[in-house]
Structure formats: C-alpha cells, structure tokens
Image (cartoon, grey):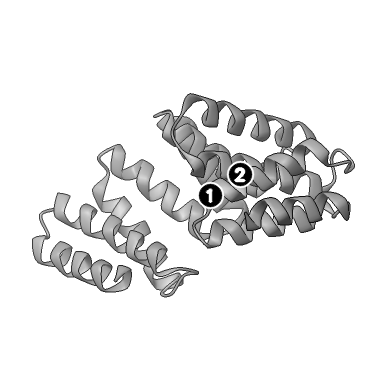
Amino acid sequence: TPSSTLLQVLQDEEASQDTWANVGLAYMQQNLAGESSAILQAACSTSSGKNGSTPNVRLLASAGIAHLAVGNSEEDRRRAEQRFTSASKEDTFFPMNWMGQGFLNFRAKRLDQARFFFDTTLKQCGPVLPALLGMAAVLFCEGNYKQAQELYGQAMKLYPTSSSNTTSASIRVGFGLASYRLGQVDRAKASFRRALELDA
C-alpha cells in the first residue's frame, strides 16, 4: 500500500520527527486516520528525538490524536492516553496536547476534565477551531445550549471555510442542534440545509 511504502521510506531515510508528524497530519487531512495512526505509531517507536523537544512532544500529541480518530476501542483510547501522558511529561504546556486530552476526556464522558483542557487552550492560544468545537460540544452535553450555539457561531465566523467541507458542515450541524434545543426551529433547519450543501 502507499502508506506502507512511505513508512519504509521514512524509516530508511531516518526522517525528522517534524517530517513524521507532517506526514501523519497529511493523512488525517485526507480522512485517512488509520494510515495516520500507523505512521505516527511507527514514528514513536523508531524516533530518536530529544525528550522535551517541541518536535518530540508534537509527535507524541499527534499520535495520541490519531489514535482517537481511528476508533472508539478501549485499545485506541489506551494508546492515546499513553501518548498524551508521555507528551505531558515532556512539556506540560503544549497546546496540541491539551486539545488531545480534551477530546480523550470528552470521549470518556469526563466533561469537567474535557472542559478544563479546552478552556486552557482557548485562554492560552485564543479561539483555535478544535478547542472551540470541543468546548461547544461540552457545553451542549451539559445542556448549556445557548453558550454552545454562541461558540459554534463564533467558529462559523472565524473559520467560514475550514480545511475541509466536512468540518464546515460539522460546525453547522452543531449550531443547528443547539438552535433546535433552544426552540429556534427555522434557524436549525437553515443550518442543517447549509451543512448538507457543504457535505455534498
């Protein structure tokens, strides 16, 4: 397969940690989470980077996020948590790791912990899209539909076209769901229609 060939090239060339992380990100952007996870897992196993270096922490956090994207199995969550823990030991203040831990806790329905990580990211880094969406999802699950709607609206304004139409559509679905819960049915329908247009 193309990813196994690329994996072999990266290993043979002793690619830098940044190169491994960039390749993993490229696979994620193409919605190929399995390939991304395999590449980043191999990178973590073969990497000889310096502990505490930004490339090493980025690689660990990227691998954790890729494990979460692959699926909902206990093994995927365990691997993700291991990567995030390793990244935290090297750099407690790495924002990508905060977001990953936020999503890990959200998946485990530990909403208070998810809120902490998304809120920390938003306070330290500003309104980055994954943290906005994560916090909006937490608020929605807590029944705070008005604040969730506001964050989804902020995401639509700040990121009118994201890296993929799927992400733009997802933002509108979240906005539509929050609108529906607030009794704003026409607004919800319009948001769902726009999501369908973007996802087509």
Residue 97, position in %: x, y?
A: 64, 43
Q: Tell whether label 1 touches label 2 (CB within 8 Å).
A: yes
Residue at image mark 2: 37
Report the side of 14 relative to 141 (left or right): right
Residue at image mark 1: 33
Seen from the viewer's position, the closer of residues 84 and 76 is 76
Secondary structure of the residue carrying tag 1 is helix
Residue 185, position in %: x, y?
A: 9, 60
The structure residue drawn at horizontal position 32% and vertical position 59%, both measured from the top left corner, is: 150
What amino acid type should be assigned to the residue bearing mark 2?
Ser
Q: In terms of image quadrants, where is residue 140?
A: top left
The structure residue drawn at horizontal position 85% and vertical position 54%, both measured from the top left corner, is: 16
- What is the number of the mark on residue 119? none
- Quadrant containing the C terminus is bottom left
Q: In terms of image quadrants, where is residue 159?
A: bottom left
What amino acid type should be assigned to the residue bearing mark 1?
Ala
Q: Is residue 186 above or below residue 100?
A: below
Secondary structure of the residue carrying tag 2 is helix
Measured in 3D between alpha carbons, the distance from the residue under mark 2 to the one under mark 1, in whole angstroms, is 6 Å
Q: Is residue 19 above or below residue 47?
A: below
Residue 95, position in %: x, y?
A: 65, 48
Report the side of 187 relative to 111 (left or right): left
The structure residue drawn at horizontal position 72% and vertical position 48%, both measured from the top left corner, is: 58
Residue 27, position in %: x, y?
A: 59, 58
